Image (cartoon, rainbow, N blue to C red):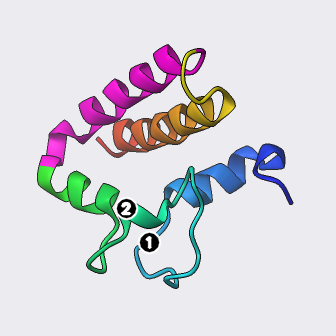
Amino acid sequence: MSIDDATPEEWNRASNRKSSYPEDNHHPITKPQHYNKGGIEAIDYIKQQLGTGFGDYCAGNVMKYVHRFKYKNGLEDLKKARVYLDWLIEDVKGD
């Protein structure tokens, strides 16, 4: 299956991933290899450190990726924006 064919449910599962995935299970949009050094996903660390500010962080990244998609990475940036939007939605629902 291609990432382009992923359903909303599959994106939700990807955005709710745990840091216990095998080291070789990486994806350039949902689980970049360079963001999992030291045994913890960078996004999990950021969420832990920001606490209630995590939603603002996600919203800022949605804006960043939507703004730059035409000039930098095209569809890949839109998919990254969608991941951050899903995390933002989950954060809002959790409040």
Name the residue carrying label 1.
18
Residue pictured at 37% horizontal, 30% vertical: 61
Badge 2, how many Cα within 10 Å: few under 14, some, many 20+?
Answer: some
Q: Which residues are magenta?
A: 50-70
Q: Where, quadrant-wise, is the C terminus in this rendering? A: top left
Mark closest to the chain's N terminus, 1 or 2: 1
For the residue marked with disc 2, what is the amino acid?
Tyr
The image's mark for residue 65 is none
- Can you give x and y, in whole percent of width and height, for residue 5 in the image? 84, 47
Image position of 20 with respect to 69: above or below: below
Classify residue 60 by image quadrant.
Answer: top left
Relative depth, front residue between 62 and 95 = 62
Tell me which residue sits at (83%, 54%) in the image: 2
Position of 81 with respect to 57 (left or right) is: right
- Whether the magenta-drawn stretch holds residue 62 is answered as yes
Q: Secondary structure at mark 2?
A: helix
Mark 1–mark 2 distance (CA, rounded to whole Å): 13 Å
Which element carries disc 1, helix, strand or loop?
Answer: loop
Residue 87 located left or right of residue 51: right
Q: Give how far across and how far down residue 74 sits, in percent.
A: 64, 26
| Magenta stretch holds residue 63 | yes
Left or right: 39 as drawn, with respect to 12:
left
Looking at the image, residue 31 sits to the left or right of residue 61; the answer is right
Please name the residue that numbered disc 2 is placed on. Answer: 35
Amino acid under disc 1: Lys
Local packing at callout 1 (Cα closer than 10 Å; few below 14, some 14-19, many 20+) is few
- Which quarter of the rendered picture does the N terminus lie within? bottom right
